[in-house]
Amino acid sequence: MKEPGKKYNDEDNMLVNDLRSIVSKARSKAFAAVNYSLVERNWRIGQRIVEQEQNGASRAEYGKHVIEVASAALTEEFGKGFSYTNIAN
């Protein structure tokens, strides 16, 4: 039975609390999965750029061209988040 001034009765409160827990845990898992994917994506982008810049050499002569090309192509296809600065760092 609902007490005066309470929004939900005890049984409903248990349900709402369980649902909150389910949603919170799912959100946390989703955030972690997205974060992992973004870190992996950025690492692979960086790895590929370094391979391109090194062109088989043990050390790269760093230039702007590869990063400019990568930035332009990725921004054109995927939108914001792939500026020269973001890719270079």
Image (cartoon, rainbow, N blue to C red):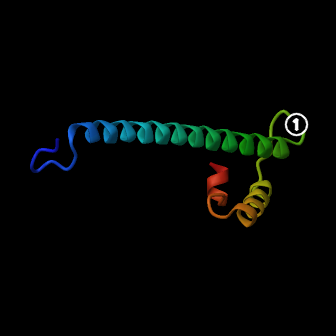
- Provide residue 59's location: percent of width, then percent of height: 81, 36
Question: Is 9 situated left or right of 62 in this image?
Answer: left
Front residue of 48 and 24: 24
Front residue of 29 and 18: 18
- Provide residue 15's location: percent of width, then percent of height: 33, 38
Residue that carries the numbered disc 1 in the rendered image: 57
In the displayed orientation, state which residue is furthest to the bottom: 76
Question: Is 22 situated left or right of 78 in this image?
Answer: left
Q: Dot 1: within a 10 Å radius of its alpha carbon, few (fewer than 14), some, or many (20 or more) residues? A: few
Front residue of 22 and 52: 22
Residue at horizontal 77%, vertical 57%? Answer: 70
Residue at horizontal 65%, vertical 60%? Answer: 83
Question: Is 5 situated left or right of 18 in this image?
Answer: left
Q: Quadrant of the N terminus?
A: top left
- Provide residue 12's location: percent of width, then percent of height: 28, 41
SS at mark 1 in the image: loop
In the displayed orientation, state which residue is furthest to the right: 56
Q: In the rendered structure, which amino acid carries the disc numbered 1?
A: Ala
Residue at horizontal 10%, vertical 51%? Answer: 5
In the displayed orientation, state which residue is furthest to the left: 4
Residue at horizontal 32%, vertical 42%? Answer: 16
